[in-house]
Structure formats: structure tokens, C-alpha cells
Image (spheres, helix red, strand yellow):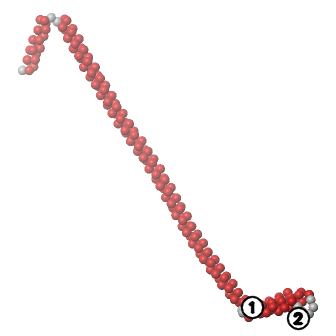
Amino acid sequence: MRYTLALALTFGAASPALAASGPFFSLGNTDFVVLLAFLLFVGILLAAKVPSMLGKQLDSRAEGIQKELDEARALREEAQTILASYERKQQEVQAQAEQIVTAAREEAARAAEQAKADLEVSIARRLASAEEQIASAEASAVKEVRDQAITIAVAAADEVISKQMTAAEANKLIDAAIADVDAKLH
């Protein structure tokens, strides 16, 4: 069927050439020679089964393209699967990162609270130590003032007594003190 259709189209295309010049079936007519050469060429192609070879090559090429498309489709599906896997992993990593950040913030808040409590305890200890030092310094100052007052009072009393007392009165007091000490010791 293909062959007859190809011949009919060939003759149909040659009909305007037939009307152009005198006797068509002569070897002097170039159109006729070209037509014969073309028909001979087409006949050789048909005899050598070139159309079926071309069809086989086109079919094999189509099969190759189909295989490549199938491979590309499979690769695309695999790539989509891998992409989905990586997206899931990314979401998991993002969730873990958020958990780590949250835990770090909570730990930092706890550490700040602990540091604040430690600082308050340290301040309280230092304040107590400072108060103790102040109390000790105050007691020391009071003792020094008392000692100084006693020293001054004894010196003043000594001076007053020595001015007011006579030698006889001093001897009486010394004898009374010796008797007092002797009574207490025995």
C-alpha cells in the first residue's frame, strides 16, 4: 500500500512537468530522464528494503528514548524520595536544634538563678563578717577607752589621795590591807 501511494504521488507530482514540453517519453527530455532516475532510485530503495530498515531504526530509537524516559522517571521518583527523606531529616534536625536551644536557655536561666543565690549568700557572709569586724573593732575601742579611763581614773585618784592623805593615814591603810590579805589567804 505504501509503495503504490508513493508511486501515485510521484506521478502526480510529475504531471505538470509532462505538460511543459513536447514528447515526454524521449531520452532527450530531461524531465523524463529525471523521472526515470527517480523511479529507479525509489525502486532500488524498495528492493533494498530501506523503508523497513528505516522503520526498524526509528522503532529502536523510539524504544531507546522510551527506556531513557522510563529511567528518567525512575530517577525522578528516587530523587523525590531522597528529597522527602532529607526534608524529614532537616525537620528532625530543626526540632532537635530547637530543643537544644530551649534546654540551653533553661540551663542558662537556672545558672543565673544559682549565681544570684550564690551572690546573695556571699554578700550575706561578707556583710556578717564586716559586722563582726565592726563589733570587734567597737569592743576593742570600748576596751581601750575603758582601759584609758581606768588608767586616768587611777592616776587621778592617786593624785587626789596623795594630796589629801597624810603619812599616818597611809600607814593605817597599808596595815589594814595587809590584815585583809592575811585574812583572805589563811
Residue on which the image places disc 2? 26
Q: Which residue is mark 1?
A: 45
Task: Please state, as top left, top right, bottom left or bottom right, where the C terminus lies in the image.
Answer: top left
Front residue of 45 and 129: 45
Q: Along the polypeptide, which appears first: circle 1 or circle 2?
A: 2
Residue 40 at what x, y percent from top left?
Answer: 79, 93
Q: Residue at x 88, y 87 (%)?
A: 17
Of the residues shown, which amino acid type is indicated by label 1?
Leu
**Res 8 seen here:** no
- Taking the image as shown, residue 51 lies to the left or right of residue 99, namely right
Instruction: Specify the quadrant of the image occupied by residue 41.
Output: bottom right
Q: Is 107 on the left-hand or right-hand side of 29? A: left
Above or below for 4 versus 184: below
Please report the residue visible at 10 percent of the width from the left and 17 percent of the height from the top: 181
Residue drawn at x 85%, y 87% as measured from the top left:
13
Residue depicted at x 26% and y 17%? 149
Residue 112: quadrant of the picture: top left
Image coordinates of residue 6 in percent, x first then y, are 80, 89
Residue 148 visible here: yes
Instruction: Find residue 142 and report its horizontal and vertical position in percent.
Output: 29, 22
Q: Is residue 16 left or right of residue 39?
A: right
User: Which residue is the extreme one toward the right?
Assistant: 22
Q: Say which element carries label 2.
A: loop
Q: Amino acid at mark 2?
A: Ser
| Secondary element type, mark 1 | helix
